[in-house]
Amino acid sequence: MVDRPPVSGYMEDEPVESARVVVLVHGTLDRGNSFRRTMRRLEDVRVITYDRRGYQESRGADPPVGLEGHIEDLLGILAEVGDRSVVVGHSLGGAVAIGAALAEPERFAALGAFEPPLSWLPIEGRDARGAIAPTSDPDAAVETFFRGRVGDAAWDRLEPAARADRLADGPALVADLKSLHGEQLFDVTQLAVPVVFGVGGTTDQFHKENLAWLATHVPGAQQIEIADAGHGAHLTHPDAFAGFVRTTIARAAEPDALDARVGGS
């Protein structure tokens, strides 16, 4: 058993005997409990999720960190779990999961990444910075990101307490965006675990281009599209997102694929 990483807000289903462990990693300006609808649809699976460092219940644990710090936190959780786990990340959580799988593939039974915002992918004809540029103003970053992802009307409807709660995640959001717009942190084509990439049928061009590139350049990758869903599919289409998780779990049950990519360790 290792010390818990500096994150909080753990949500875990009641342990299911002999069940596969699935760790869900949330995206930017989000929190672990955003997966609660998905978790209710995975009653036969032991599901763990948490608030990434700097978000919600993990705000006071340590200063916000970039992608590398979140990768370290996830590896700490997987070390505590012990057995190989299925890890599914949404948005930046997908990038965290990919980075962790590249660092310690022996901890992964399979990996799922839904629209990971890998801004450094060499996609011809687009701005390498991606859809949302970083800023040093946390409040401005939160409002811009929320309006862009959820909509102007949703931001304008927020009650003062709910808006303040979102703004409190501003420093973590700034750290997330800066880490995505720096130098390439890892080479996703070197993944050595079974992987499923997910995309929403109505998502933006940035994420569609990313997923098309990943499906082509990551050996053995499987791609799942959730029709009629945008970037926030785990919130709007929980049945389909739970299906995405189950598809990733199914890849963990492919011993030949796992042995070939992780050396059968």
Image (cartoon, rainbow, N blue to C red):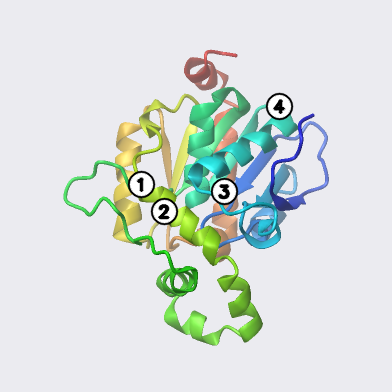
Of the 4 image quadrants, the one containing the N terminus is top right
Give the residue type that dot 2 points to. Lys
Mark whose residue sits in front, 4 or 2: 2
Give how far apart the Cα atoms at labels 1 and 2 are.
6 Å
- Disc 4 is placed on an element classified as loop
Q: Secondary structure at mark 1?
A: loop
Q: Mark 1 highlights which residue?
A: 182
Whichever of labels 1 and 3 marks the residue nearer the N terminus, that label is: 1
Marking on residue 157: none
Q: Nearer the viewer, mark 2 or mark 3?
A: 2
Left or right of 100: which side holds 135? left
Circle 3 residue: 243
Crowd band around label 4 with a 10 angstrom C-alpha radius: few (<14), some (14–19), many (20+): some
In the picture of the structure, the residue carrying the numbered disc 2 is 178
Residue 202 location in percent, x, y?
Answer: 37, 63
Categorize mark 3 by other alpha carbons within 10 Å: few (<14), some (14-19), many (20+). some
Asked if labels 4 and 3 touch by Cβ distance under 8 angstroms, the answer is no
Q: Which residue is mark 4?
A: 83
Which residue is drawn at the image coordinates 65% and 56% (left, top)? 32
Q: Measured along the vertical axis of the image, is residue 254 above or below residue 41?
A: above
Find numbered disc 3 in the image and state the secondary structure of the residue it sits on: helix
